[in-house]
Image: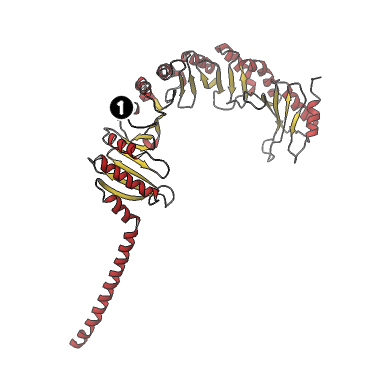
Amino acid sequence: MTTQTTTRHPRRRRRTIGICAALALSLAAGLGLWARSDGFRIAREIGDLSGVASAELERGEGAPSERILRVEIAPATGETEIERILEATEAMVDDETAYSARVSLGTAEVAVGSRYRAGIHDAVQALMALSTLPDGRAVLDDREIVFDDADGPPLVNILEWLTVIEEEDLRVENVKVTEEEGRNAISIHRLRTDHREVLQALGEWGPDITFLRLEGAHLEIRTSLPLQALGPLAEDAQSAARALDPESPRVSLETSDRRTLSVGDEDPGTALEMAGEVEAGGWSVQWLNSGVTAIDVTASEGSAADPSLLPDLAETLRTAGLPREASIRVDEGALFRGTLSDLEDLAPTIAQVHADGYVVRWMREDRRPGPDARVRVEMPAGHSLSEDSDLAAAIDAARSVPWPGTGAITLTTTPEAGSSEDSREVTLRSAATGTAEDVQVDPDHLPGADQVQEAWDATSTEG
């Protein structure tokens, strides 16, 4: 037994020596790789800098190569040290060691990207000025500061944050305040000193304002209030906007169900009173302005408006006090777009042809170049453009609703319920009593352009 044990020891020693040598080689190779890695470079060039509390690479939300370098600066770090840290961080982004970087100090953070970034001096100034916010955090990205993670009301906090920006003379163009899940609460573009006055004037409305946007002299507000309750807020917003433009305040108020009141220099109460009368008539006001020069309406139940009810709408708008030259859109302009005078003249005819099975959509155009109006005639189900009588009837329906200048006219079929056929259409341009020009037909289907031209021109009353 003694002899056998003695002969095994050299083998064990040789095996142990081999394992140790392999481990040493592996360790040396690993150290070599680590010394050449991005992590080693970050630890050496940034982590060892005075004032750096931590520095590490994280995987971004995009491609695996889009790694984010996060650097945390220790409290009480001096301005010179912060500047060196930012310079070293920018170098990492410039040579693509990291796709972008975030450098933080207390409640402040600066974004460093490959294309957009604040200047070193501005970034140092922002980090130091915003590092001890009593509520929330601030992120500087180029010339924009985003405030988030705050517990207090946005309209209260924003005034405190603007005070810091003004007192520290931070070079900022845009300011945003976000709430839970990144939802914007306040957005200020092209920051002006008089924006503070606007925000102060609206402070008491904080619980009712879900979003506020200031861009130059324009004020946009989204609110949880219904349209008919907008009066006091609209008056206060108008008064606040006068601080930006005393001659011509511009305010847009949008309710939670996406209905809008546009306020200028006129009394918004007048417009809201008129909207109430329109809605009492069974319609829903989607957009109107305080000058009551334009209004958008839809059917109150949210479905498409019934063309047979357009005469009632015209009477409701007239009784409510809408001027005859005011612009009207019905179903966002899909059914009708023109003046009240147009609607009063055309509504009875549109209702009559609807009773005959046709849907006529009439739209006055104000954009140039282009037609002066568009008229679309949807034929009864089962009618065909290739049938002379059906084509003639569709042309009569179009001619029955005259339009100004040159109109773009579309005649389209309506497939029967359950049919797999697509609708067919022809388009042309013509004056209300004129001959056809620029006739466009589907080359793969009847009718031909000559047939449409002949049928249309046969109804022309121009000499």
On the picture, is 198 further left or further right than 392? left
Q: Is 30 left, or right, of 350 in this rendering?
A: left
Q: Nearer the viewer, residue 102 or 458?
A: 102
Rendered view: 67 above or below 268: below
Q: Is residue 415 above or below residue 346?
A: below
Mark 1: which amino acid?
A: Thr
Quadrant for residue 137, please give it. Answer: top left
- Residue 71 rendering spot, x and y as whole percentages: 31, 46
* Residue 229 located left or right of residue 302: left
- Residue 321 place in picture, x, y as percent: 55, 11
Residue pictured at 26% horizontal, 49% vertical:
49
Q: Name the quarter where the N terminus is drawn.
A: bottom left
Residue at point 59%, 22% (across, down)? 329
Q: Nearer the viewer, residue 388 or 50?
A: 50
Q: Is residue 48 above or below residue 247?
A: below
Write the residue at 28% across / 42% down: 82
